[in-house]
């Protein structure tokens, strides 16, 4: 046997026989493993967090919050992660418009776990947990019929206005966040006592809840960006709650009427419009915004045309969803594709189970669209299903008039359409991705994918010798 063959033989033995090294996981049930990570592993990930608002910092309090998210309250964390697809696009839009750090959005995770109907024991409410007095001070209407602390758009604008005022005062986001929680007076006293404007140096002079507030923010940032390493699975809401549109309503109308006109279930109308406390939109000279599934908005506008609606030119009633298949091309990135498909990067990440917004050439992406805005080859979907992955799909090609399209033939007789300014490309192989779990060997992995060999994994992922990949490593797997 030659030396090279001997080396390959022992490499194969190593991969067949040795599982990925790590600490033993704990379990919350007989089915769900909960990994346990060392302080060194957590600290390395914390340091890699992208944050312009708060300096990533691992201490005992941050670790305790990470444990709460990843072990003690996993179900709540998975619901929160799913709601991010609804609210993060809204938060990021207004933060960008106000030239504020995008990671300020994690404040709402700390405050309400992204629950617009959350009420604290002292009466703070909504996504950003405004007290009634503070909410009214920043322009939010709160009465027996409406509570705009629950309105994702209006409450976010009010929170940004308040946070900007606090940042202008302290010129430090960590202190601004602390003041958002406890009020400027307590932060001012802590600064005087500690003789510093460094949050980590003066936090011992703050109330207990406030001194833990910034560490909770760091932990929220961590879990949103590393949930997959803790085997957490976001519980995403119905597609009707993800792809939405809005219009201004001036007359009084009940959710029941809206449901009858549009065919939208009342619970979805309630979820999309949580600020209306009695299931009725009151009449108003200025109007209130009504949010509905985008596919159902034309039916509403036919019944109640709005003078300032962007959708009054839409004909027809209830529209349909289409599932588009797109292969990532050279030069693509997730924000570019989100613009192309008129959605948000969070949508693409949710629809394709992507924990991070990174794409690979040749990767197949699933995109959901409304029938009047389809821009790629599609497979028709029946009306909204909570389990879209189990829906029987009927192939149908939809060509929209603008922009013009040209076909590009892809592997396995699948097609996409690209704008005519794109050049046809040669078919590319498609890949799946596998995140290594604890106690999982390469042999365990290849048994999950038909036609994949150990050699395929070694070559695709540039694994040589005994350099075993660690837990959480993303392996590229070719689709056969």
Image (cartoon, rainbow, N blue to C red):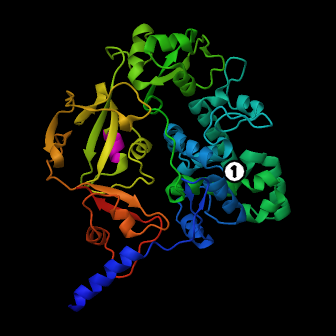
**Taking 399 as reference, is 10 above or below it?**
below
Residue drawn 41% across and 51% down? 354
Membership of 230 in magenta stretch = no
In the image, residue 378 above or below residue 457: above
Residue with the mark numbered 1: 176
* Quarter of the image with the N terminus in it: bottom left
Is 348 placed above or below 8 here?
A: above
Question: Secondary structure beneath disc 1?
Answer: helix
Q: Quadrant of residue 281?
A: top right
Q: Which percent across, then down, holds residue 324?
A: 28, 37
Image quadrant of residue 129? Answer: top right
Residue found at x 36% / y 68%: 443
On the question of residue 273 being in view, the answer is yes
Q: Which residues are magenta?
A: 336-340
Quadrant of residue 117 within the rendered picture: top right
Q: Nearer the viewer, residue 104 or 18?
A: 18
Most foreground residue, 115 or 106? 115
């Amino acid at each position: 046997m030659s030396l090279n063959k001997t080396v390959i033989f022992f490499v194969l033995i190593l991969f067949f026989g040795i599982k990925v090294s790590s600490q033993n996981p704990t379990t919350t049930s007989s089915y769900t493993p909960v990994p346990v990570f060392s302080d060194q592993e957590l600290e390395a990930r914390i340091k890699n967090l992208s944050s312009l608002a708060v300096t990533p910092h691992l201490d005992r309090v941050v670790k305790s919050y990470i444990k709460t998210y990843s072990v003690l309250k996993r179900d709540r964390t998975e619901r929160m992660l799913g709601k991010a697809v609804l609210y993060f696009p809204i938060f990021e839009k207004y933060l960008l418009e106000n030239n504020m750090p995008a990671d300020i959005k994690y404040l709402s995770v700390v405050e309400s776990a992204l629950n617009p109907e959350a009420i604290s024991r002292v009466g703070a409410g909504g996504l950003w947990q405004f007290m009634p007095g503070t909410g009214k001070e920043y322009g939010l209407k709160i009465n027996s019929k409406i509570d705009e602390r629950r309105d994702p758009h209006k409450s976010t604008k009010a929170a940004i206005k308040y946070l900007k005022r606090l940042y202008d005062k302290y010129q430090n986001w960590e202190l601004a966040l602390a003041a958002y929680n406890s009020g400027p007076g307590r932060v001012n006293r802590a600064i005087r006592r500690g003789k510093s404007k460094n949050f980590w140096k003066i936090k011992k002079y703050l109330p207990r809840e406030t001194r833990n507030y910034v560490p909770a923010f760091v932990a929220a940032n961590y879990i949103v960006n590393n949930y997959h390493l803790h085997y957490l699975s976001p519980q995403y809401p119905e597609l009707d709650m993800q792809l939405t549109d809005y219009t201004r309503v001036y007359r009084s109308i009940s959710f029941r009427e809206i449901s009858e006109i549009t065919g939208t279930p009342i619970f979805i109308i309630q979820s999309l419009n949580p600020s209306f406390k009695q299931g009725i939109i009151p009449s108003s000279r200025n109007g209130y915004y009504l949010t509905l599934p985008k596919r159902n908005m034309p039916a509403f506008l036919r019944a109640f045309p709005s003078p300032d609606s962007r959708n009054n030119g839409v004909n027809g009633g209830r529209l349909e969803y289409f599932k588009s298949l797109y292969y990532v091309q050279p030069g693509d990135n997730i924000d570019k594709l989100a613009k192309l498909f008129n959605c948000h990067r969070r949508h693409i990440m949710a629809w394709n189970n992507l924990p991070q917004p990174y794409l690979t050439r040749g990767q197949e992406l699933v995109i959901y669209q409304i029938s009047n805005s389809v821009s790629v080859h599609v497979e028709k979907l029946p009306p909204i299903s909570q389990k879209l992955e189990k829906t029987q799909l009927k192939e149908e090609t939809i060509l929209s008039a603008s922009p013009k399209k040209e076909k590009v033939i892809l592997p396995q007789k699948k097609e996409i359409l690209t704008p005519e300014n794109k050049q046809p490309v040669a078919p590319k192989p498609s890949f799946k991705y596998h995140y290594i779990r604890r106690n999982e060997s390469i042999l365990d992995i290849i048994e999950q994918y038909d036609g994949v060999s150990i050699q395929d994994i070694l070559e695709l992922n540039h694994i040589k010798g005994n350099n075993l990949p660690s837990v959480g490593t993303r392996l590229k797997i070719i689709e056969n």
